[in-house]
Amino acid sequence: MPFTQSDAPARPGRAPGSIDYRFARRQVLRRVRAGELQRSEVCDAQRELLRVAEHYSQRATTPCPVCGESELRIVRYVFGPRLPAGGRAVASRAELRKLAAGRSGLRCYTVEVCLGCRWNHLVEVVPLASSSDPEPVAPARSRPRSSS
Ligand SMILES: [Zn+2]
């Protein structure tokens, strides 16, 4: 797998069977800001992941949470039967739909990658149903909380 799997606690996501790593991501970012983690420990995207982020990704709507530059990209990898062991990078939702059509057992890994500082983190894992469209991913945009 070309990206680091989170060992932090994951939570069930919104879609059935999905796993949400946003909580783990926030914890990592908090530890970086607190000085418990070095930037070099979390800004370690491999060359292959950076290449995919540059060419097969969507631009995130918010800046990088680590360096603040507008170089954050959303990368999606699909894993499943008859796909490469390292997954297939998918650039658009249309491509994702096409890949999922008529297949089952596919899972989409969404990773955010910064081309500036090499920050990368798994955001969520969502099973792809052949008939349904996966939830649009907007990992960087935090929703306002009503309970305060
Ligand atoms: Zn960055």
Image (tube, helix red, strand yellow):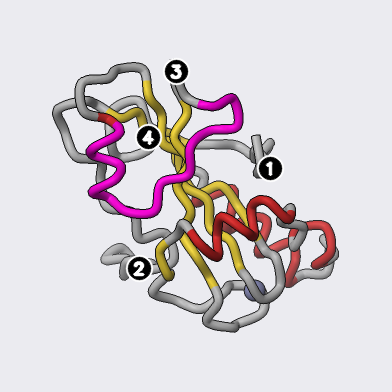
The percent position of residue 108, horizontal first and vertical second, equals 41, 36
Amino acid carrying mark 1 in the image: Thr
Q: Please give the residue where the numbered disc 2 appears in the rendered image.
A: 148
On whether residue 18 falls in the magenta region, the answer is no
Give the Cα distance between marks 3 and 4. Answer: 18 Å
Residues rendered magenta in the picture: 84-99
Q: CA distance from mark 2 to mark 4?
A: 29 Å
Whichever of callouts 3 and 1 sits on the residue coming sooner in the sequence is: 1
- Sooner in the amino-acid sequence: mark 2 or mark 1: 1
Mark 2, secondary structure of its residue: loop
The local secondary structure at tag 4 comes to strand
Q: Amino acid at mark 3?
A: Arg
Residue 4 circle label: 1
Q: Residues within 10 Å of mark 1 (few under 14, many from 20)?
A: some
Mark 4, Cα crowd under 10 Å, few <14 / some 14-19 / many 20+, is many
* Spatial separation of the CA atoms under disc 2 and disc 1: 33 Å
Query: What residue lies at 74% left-to-right and 53% top-to-bottom?
Result: 46
Q: Does the beta carbon at disc 3 come under 8 Å from ligand 1?
A: no
Residue 37 point in image, percent of width and height: 82, 61
Q: Give the left or right position of residue 94, taking residue 68 as reference.
A: left
Q: Which mark is residue 126?
A: 4
> Ligand 1 is located in which of the four quadrants?
bottom right
